[in-house]
Image: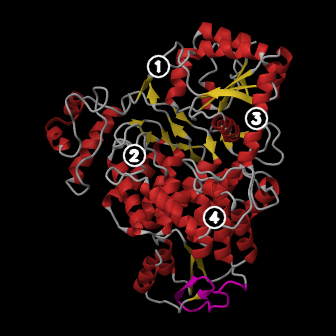
C-alpha cells in the first residue's frame, strides 16, 4: 500500500503525492479495497488554492504518526473539488444535512459503498479551541465503525433520504413578480450600505446576487452594485499591482483577502464591471477591467484558454507574495513614497500582521500617470519574489463564464480584441473538450480530459455561444449552442423540465443523482439553462424555448424557500417576461454596437431577422431599411434610425 496520486492530473492531488498518507484517487478500486478490508473511507476534498487545505496537509497529512493511524484504519481518498464538483456538491450537501457548516478542506467519512455518515471540515493535529484533534476524530470514528454498524447504517440512510429530498423538484407556478420583488427586498435588507456587499464578515463578491439586483433594474439595486464594485476595486481584495480580485475578504471592509485568485470570480466581476460602466461610465471600472484582463492574459493563459486559479500561499506563507513593509515601499519609490501614500495608506506598523496590503483611499481622479509609475516599480520588486502556485487545469464552465464576460466587456470598453480572445477560447474548448454527442467535458490538463462534463459546463458554454452569436453575427455560434443544448437535454434532463448535475451515463457518482438550483459563487447550471432557453426564445421566436423555460421554472415553483437562494433562476423568469429584443436591419452596425453595449442584461440583439420564427414580432421586417426595432412582449416599436434615440430607449428599458 502506497500513496497513489503520482499519476493524477490535478495539481491539487499532485500537491499530496508525497504525503505518507496512502491516498487514492476517487474510483472503484478505492471502494473495493475498503470493502475487502471492512474499513470506512476517509474522503478529503479541497483545491489547489485553498489556504486551510495547505494548513491541514502540513499539520496532519505530512505527519507520519497521523498518516499511520489513517492508513491503518481507513481507506483515504483525495478529491479536487474543482475537477469533480459533482462529488464535492454531493458530500457538501450531506454535511449540511448533518447540521454542520461547510467549507474546505471538506472531511467526510463514508461506508465502503460511498454513503456518508459523518463529516466536518478542518481539524487541528492537537485539541484546539474546543475542537477535537484529527487523531482523536480518526480513533473515535474507527471505533464507531467497529462497534456501532447498525447506528451508522441508520445515520447513512437518514442522510441519503435528506439528499434525495434536497434534490427533489416540487412543481408549482413559475415564480412571478411578487416573489422576485420579495427576494430583491430581502437582499437589499442584507446590504452593507457603507462598505458595500452583503453585511458582515467574511465578505464574498456574491456576484449572482448582485447581477440579479442589477437585472431587476431597481435604483437601490443598481446603487448596491455600484457601491460593491467601487469598494472592492479600491480595497485590498483587489491586486493593485497585478490586476484581478481575490476570492473573498476576511474582514467587512474588503481589506484583508484570502489571497487566492479564482478564474470564475474574475470572469463574473469583469462582466458586472461592464454593465456598471454602461450605466455610469467610471474611469475606475475601465481601469479595473483592463487590469483584470491583463492579469488573465499575462498570468493565466494555458493551453489556449485560462488556468483555474492562483494560490494564496508562496514559500509556505499566506499572502507573502503580495504584501510589503513600509521600508520596502520607501526603498522602491524613493522620493515618490510620500506621494504614493496620499492614495495608498502605508502605516508604519502595517495594516495586516505587521505588513501592508495595498488598498486605495484616494478617488480615481488624481495623478494617475504618476501613481501608475509607482505601482510599476512595486510590481517590478514583487516580480523578483517566488510566485504563488498556479492550478493550470482548464475548466470548461469557468472558461465559458470568462468568454461571456470578455464579450460584454469588449463591447462596452471598446476592446474588440477581447471579443476575438473569447472566440479563440470558445474554439479551443469545442475542439479540445467537445464530445461526439455534443457534450463538453469538464476538466483538461496537458491536453488530456480528466473529468466528464457536468451541467454547469454545458449551460455556461451555451451562454457563451449565445453571447458570441449576438456580438459577431456568426451563425455557427448559434448552431453550436443549440447542439450543446440538445445534448444537455438528452443526457442531463429529467424529462420533466429540470436537470441533473451529472449525466445519465456517470458511473462513479454516489446516488441519489443530484439536482440543484442554488447559486454559489458561480451560477447554478439549472439557472443558466433557464436563461439560455429564455434568451433563445427572444432571439429566435421559437415557442418551444418559451415552453422549456417555463418547464424549468415550474419544476421548482412549489419550493419558494429554495428559490430565494436561486437568483439566477429567478433572473430567468424576469428575462422570459421582460426581455427587450433589438432587431437591427440594413447593416447598421453602429446601432448593433450601441444595443450590445446597453446596461440592461435583458437586452438581446440580432441582425436582420435571419433566424426569426414567424411567431417573432419582428418577423417580416424589411431587411434593407437601416434601422433598429425594439421589441417588447409581442410588439415591436417603429423603426429607429437615430442612434441617440435608440440609446435613450434602451436606457429607459432599465
The answer to which of marks 3 and 2 sits earlier in the sequence is 3
* Residue on which the image places disc 3: 158
Q: Is residue 208 above or below residue 602?
A: above
Give the residues in magenta: 614-635
Q: Is residue 2 visible?
A: no
Q: Secondary structure at mark 1?
A: loop
> Which mark is in front, 4 or 2?
4
Kind of element beneath mark 3: helix
Q: CA distance from mark 4 to mark 2?
A: 30 Å
Q: State whether residue 580 appears in this view.
A: yes
Pick the front one: 444 or 108? 108
Q: How is the image coloured?
A: secondary structure
Q: CA distance from mark 1 to mark 2?
A: 37 Å
Which residue sits at x=63%, y=50%? 397
**181 up-or-down from 637: above or below:** above
Circle 4 SS class = helix
Give the labeled residue for mark 4: 531
Left or right: where 297 falls relative to 432:
left
User: Which residue matches tag 1?
Assistant: 129
- Relative height, residue 394 to residue 60 (above, below): below
**Could you tell me how far apart the alpha carbons at marks 3 and 2 are, in whole angstroms?**
47 Å
Along the line of sight, the residue nearer the viewer: 167 or 358: 167
* Residue that mark 2 sits on: 243
Of labels 1 and 2, earlier in sequence is: 1
The x, y position of residue 409, in whole percent, is 47, 61
Amino acid at each position: 500500500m502506497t500513496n497513489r496520486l503520482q499519476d493524477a492530473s490535478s495539481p491539487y492531488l499532485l500537491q499530496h503525492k508525497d504525503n505518507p498518507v496512502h491516498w487514492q484517487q476517487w474510483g472503484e478500486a478505492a471502494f473495493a479495497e475498503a470493502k475487502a478490508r471492512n474499513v470506512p473511507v476517509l474522503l478529503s476534498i479541497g483545491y489547489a488554492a485553498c489556504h486551510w487545505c495547505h494548513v491541514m496537509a502540513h499539520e496532519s497529512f505530512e505527519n507520519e504518526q497521523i498518516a499511520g493511524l489513517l492508513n491503518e484504519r481507513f481507506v483515504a481518498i483525495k478529491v479536487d473539488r474543482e475537477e469533480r464538483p459533482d462529488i464535492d456538491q454531493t458530500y457538501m450537501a450531506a454535511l449540511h444535512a448533518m447540521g454542520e457548516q461547510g467549507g474546505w478542506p471538506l472531511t467526510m467519512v463514508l461506508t465502503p459503498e460511498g454513503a456518508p455518515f459523518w463529516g466536518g471540515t478542518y481539524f487541528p493535529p492537537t485539541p484546539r479551541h474546543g475542537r477535537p484533534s484529527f487523531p482523536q476524530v480518526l480513533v473515535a470514528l474507527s471505533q464507531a465503525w467497529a462497534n456501532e454498524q447498525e447506528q451508522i447504517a441508520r445515520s447513512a440512510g437518514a442522510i441519503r433520504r435528506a439528499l434525495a429530498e434536497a434534490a427533489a423538484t416540487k412543481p408549482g407556478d413559475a415564480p412571478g413578480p411578487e416573489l422576485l420583488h420579495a427576494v430583491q427586498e430581502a437582499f437589499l435588507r442584507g446590504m452593507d450600505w457603507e462598505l458595500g456587499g452583503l453585511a458582515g464578515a467574511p465578505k464574498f463578491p456574491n456576484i449572482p446576487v448582485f447581477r440579479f439586483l442589477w437585472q431587476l433594474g431597481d435604483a437601490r439595486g443598481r446603487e448596491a452594485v455600484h457601491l460593491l464594485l467601487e469598494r472592492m476595486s479600491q480595497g485590498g481584495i483587489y491586486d493593485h499591482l497585478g490586476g484581478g480580485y481575490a476570492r473573498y475578504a476576511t474582514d467587512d471592509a474588503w481589506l484583508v483577502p484570502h489571497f487566492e485568485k479564482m478564474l470564475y470570480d474574475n470572469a463574473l466581476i469583469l462582466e458586472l464591471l461592464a454593465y456598471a460602466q454602461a450605466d455610469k461610465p467610471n474611469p475606475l471600472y475601465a481601469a479595473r477591467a483592463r487590469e483584470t484582463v491583463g492579469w488573465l492574459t499575462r498570468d493565466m493563459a494555458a493551453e489556449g484558454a485560462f488556468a483555474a486559479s492562483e494560490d494564496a500561499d508562496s514559500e509556505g506563507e499566506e499572502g507573502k507574495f503580495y504584501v510589503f513593509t513600509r521600508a520596502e515601499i520607501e526603498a522602491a519609490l524613493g522620493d515618490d513614497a510620500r506621494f504614493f501614500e496620499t492614495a495608498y495608506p502605508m502605516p508604519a506598523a502595517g495594516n495586516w500582521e505587521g505588513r501592508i496590503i495595498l488598498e486605495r483611499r484616494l478617488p480615481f481622479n488624481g495623478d494617475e500617470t504618476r501613481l501608475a509609475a509607482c505601482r510599476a516599480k512595486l510590481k517590478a520588486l514583487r516580480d523578483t519574489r517566488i510566485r504563488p502556485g498556479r492550478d493550470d487545469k482548464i475548466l470548461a464552465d469557468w472558461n465559458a463564464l470568462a468568454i461571456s464576460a470578455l464579450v460584454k466587456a469588449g463591447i462596452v470598453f471598446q476592446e474588440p480584441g477581447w471579443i476575438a480572445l473569447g472566440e479563440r477560447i470558445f474554439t479551443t474548448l469545442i475542439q479540445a473538450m467537445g464530445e461526439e454527442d455534443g457534450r463538453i467535458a469538464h476538466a483538461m490538463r496537458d491536453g488530456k480530459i480528466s473529468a466528464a462534463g457536468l451541467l454547469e459546463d454545458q449551460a455556461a458554454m451555451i451562454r457563451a455561444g449565445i453571447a458570441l452569436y449576438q456580438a459577431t453575427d456568426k451563425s455557427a455560434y448559434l448552431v453550436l449552442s443549440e447542439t450543446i443544448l440538445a445534448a444537455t437535454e438528452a443526457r442531463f434532463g429529467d424529462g420533466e423540465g429540470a436537470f441533473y448535475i451529472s449525466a445519465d451515463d456517470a458511473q462513479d457518482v454516489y446516488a441519489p443523482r443530484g439536482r440543484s438550483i442554488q447559486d454559489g459563487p458561480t451560477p447554478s447550471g439549472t439557472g443558466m439553462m433557464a436563461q439560455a432557453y429564455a434568451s433563445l426564445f427572444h432571439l429566435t421566436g421559437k415557442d418551444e424555448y418559451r415552453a422549456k423555460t417555463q418547464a424549468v421554472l415550474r419544476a421548482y415553483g412549489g419550493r419558494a424557500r429554495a428559490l430565494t437562494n436561486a437568483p439566477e433562476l429567478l433572473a430567468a423568469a424576469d428575462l422570459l417576461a421582460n426581455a427587450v429584443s433589438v432587431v437591427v436591419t440594413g447593416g447598421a452596425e453602429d446601432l448593433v454596437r450601441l444595443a450590445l453595449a446597453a446596461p440592461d442584461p435583458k437586452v438581446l440583439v440580432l441582425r436582420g431577422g435571419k433566424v426569426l420564427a414567424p411567431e417573432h414580432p419582428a418577423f417580416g421586417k424589411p431587411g434593407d431599411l437601416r434601422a433598429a426595432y425594439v421589441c417588447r412582449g409581442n410588439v415591436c416599436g417603429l423603426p429607429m434610425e437615430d442612434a441617440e434615440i435608440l440609446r435613450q430607449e434602451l436606457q429607459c428599458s432599465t
